[in-house]
Image (spheres, helix red, strand yellow):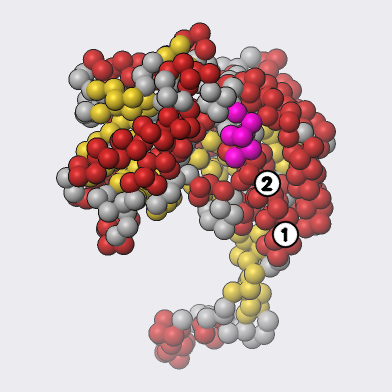
Amino acid sequence: MIAEQPQTDLKAPILAAFNRLRQHAPAMALTTAAQRIDRLKQIKMWVETYRTDIHAAMYADFRKPSAEVDLGELTGLMGDLRYTIRHLKGWMKPQRVPTPLSMVGTSGYLHYEPKGVVLIIAPWNYPFDLMVGPLVAAVAAGNVCMLKPSELTPNTSALLKRMIGQLFSPNEVVLFEGDAETAQAMLDLPFDHMFFTGSPALGKVVMTAAAKHLASVTLELGGKSPFVVDETADIKKTAEILAWAKYFNNGQTCIAPDYLLVHESVKTPLLTELQAAVERMYGSNTAARAACDSYARIVNQHHFQRVKNLIDDAARKGATVLMGGRTDEADNFIEPTLIDGVTDEMLLMQEEIFGPVLPVVSVKNLDEALAHINSREKPLALYIHSSKQQHIDYLINRTSAGDTVINDAMIHFTHSELPFGGVNNSGIGSYHGYFGFQELSHRRSILRRQFGTMSFLFPPYTERVKRFIGWAVRFS
């Protein structure tokens, strides 16, 4: 939990850095597109130069395979950087808006200005991308930033600190390592915008802190994202996608499928194909999976025990472990696990799993699947696997989710033309590409009188003036 009273000696350097940032924010707001693009190119070049260092840091933190670092941390980030560099000049231009009849004689346009001083707090599961991605949007929008990486991935945090120190002056971007006390010291300050990625519980803490200063927020949270498979789905293809999406990064992904909703008629063949896919990806037995260099680890002992408790609780309450379930506490290892016969009384159906454990829920029809989805908080992602458009439309039109992917999973996070974000419990706001630039900007309305005046509507309200006002009501 975030501590309530950070030490005075911790507060002092953070406050001093905040004041430097706030003092420099007006100058940063005046930077041109070329100047901001130069900063973004420097980030891109740094990532390209030190890619192997990024691999090594995350392997040291939780044995994340280099291929998963590239795919999960760098592919989307580099795409976002290239896309933003290519389009930023156009985004920064004033955007004209149409003039309604009642506003004849005026012209209006939208002017994007930076929020100001932005706080970015990143999580441990994708510690590089989920720090640098929001930073890209903030820099593109012309903000100054204070960064707080997760203390649970210390090697990556140290690498991020090195990167920021090499690329930015301390009056533009500053990074503080530390634990919950450090985060709380930051949350006490009057930032213009707070960007937090993490759990809904801590998202509420951040939003409460922001409310004290009426700061705007972007909250990228999580939740139980359902993976729906109907009787018309391509079973082999769906099973491969599910195995990859669920066990990628050891299941520690905010948009990972959290639980499976499968039509009873295709449950057996799907689970058979799923287990076969896991064997191809990670090995045919526990020993092979423990030795597999493509399989990450749970980040620390606390989270290892939390996920293990979910498995044990389900088993005690009557669930069946169809695959996996074995663990090694000394190595924070939990093998890919598949659990059938789950009920809502089990902990793994009540909280986000955030680990390599997939509960299976069998349904007779779409209405049952819909009831399962809508009985829970709105998820960050909804995955629908079906070859029948009518079924897809039925679920989309009757549910609410941050994002939805049809006949695939997780790949939407790297789509530069789509916003990424949650809804209600799974998040507030969205980013990536143009949407990130918008999120970290204030969209300011500018109206200019070109000719004429509205004086014919001014008091005293004679019958003639009232007629003019009536026309304004009618034709505006």
Residue 7 located left or right of residue 38: left
> Around disc 2, counting alpha carbons within 10 Å, would you say few (fewer than 14), some (14 to 19), or many (20 or more)?
many
Is 161 left, or right, of 449 in this rendering? right
Q: Nearer the viewer, residue 441 or 46?
A: 46
User: SS for tag 2?
Assistant: helix
Within the magenta stretch, is there residue 301? no
Please report the residue visible at 59 percent of the width from the left and 74 percent of the height from the top.
97
The disc labelled 2 sits on which kind of residue?
A: Met
**Residue at 39% in and 52% down:** 407
Q: Is residue 66 magenta?
A: yes
What numbered label is drawn on residue 308?
A: none
Instruction: Give the amino acid at mark 1.
Output: Arg
Judged left or right of residue 450, residue 388 is left
Spatial distance from mark 2 to mark 1, Cα to Cα? Answer: 12 Å
| Residue at the spot of label 1 | 86
| Residue in front for this viewpoint, 148 or 259 | 259
Packing grade of label 1 (10 A; few <14, some 14-19, many >=20) is few
Q: Give 327 or 201, whichever is nearer the viewer.
A: 327
Mark 2, residue position: 78
- The rendered magenta stretch, by its main secondary structure, is classed as helix
At x 23%, y 23%, the residue is: 319
Locate residue 318, reporting x and y percent. 20, 20
The x and y percentages for residue 340 are 25, 28
SS at badge 1: helix
Q: Is residue 157 visible?
A: no
Image location (x, y in percent) of residue 187: 58, 30
- The correct choice, above or below, for 446 with respect to 471 in the image is above
Instruction: Reply above or below: 48 against 310.
Output: below
Q: Are marks 2 and 1 in contact (CB under 8 Å)?
A: no
Chain part drawn in magenta = 65-71
